[in-house]
Image (cartoon, rainbow, N blue to C red):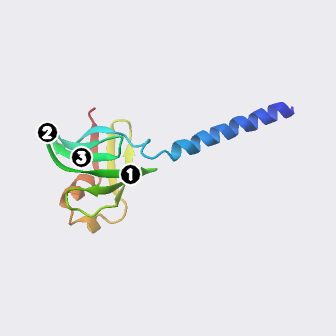
Amino acid sequence: MNTKKSLFLLINLMLLLMMVAACGSGNSGFPTGKFIKAGTAEYGLAFNKDGTFSVFDGDTTFVTGTYSVNGDTFTETSNNGGCKTNVSFKYTFDGKNLTFKYVGDPADDADCTGRNADFNNVTYTLTK
């Protein structure tokens, strides 16, 4: 009986440690790849595993930068578009569609018109 109880506790401890490791592993839950904005043909966002991103339309790149992810919060940490940094968004991803919503008031980021148009409750579809 003691052996069964010890084995049960060991297995539960291992499962708990695996869950904690998965939750704290950086951008691992955030999808990477190319995403096209709903209602457009070639305009979108590309997210790389190294924490970099770009905003593009076809072969033209408009903005590049870096991001970090903590749980379901995406934070733009740098950009070359002249917008303030460390702006955060809640995201959802259903395996195909990626949607962003501002953390806080979107009006606080109104000066960054491109980002405001691209992340203010906007959905993108994974293409590759």
Image vertical order of residue 74 relative to residue 45, above or below:
below
Name the side, left or right, on which 65 lies relative to 92. left
Q: Quadrant of residue 79?
A: bottom left
Q: Which residue is mark 1?
A: 68
Q: Which residue is mark 2?
A: 58
Q: Quadrant of residue 33?
A: top left
What residue appears at the point 58 percent right and 45 percent down from the top-left corner?
A: 20
Camera-nearest residue between 36 and 70: 70
* Contact? badges 3 and 1 (CB < 8 Å): no
Amino acid bearing label 3: Ser
Q: Which residue is mark 3?
A: 54
Say if residue 26 shows up in the picture.
yes
Amino acid bearing label 1: Ser
Say if residue 38 shows up in the picture.
no
What residue appears at the point 38 percent right and 51 percent down from the top-left corner?
A: 68
Image vertical order of residue 99 relative to residue 58, above or below:
below
Q: Nearer the viewer, mark 1 or mark 2?
A: 1
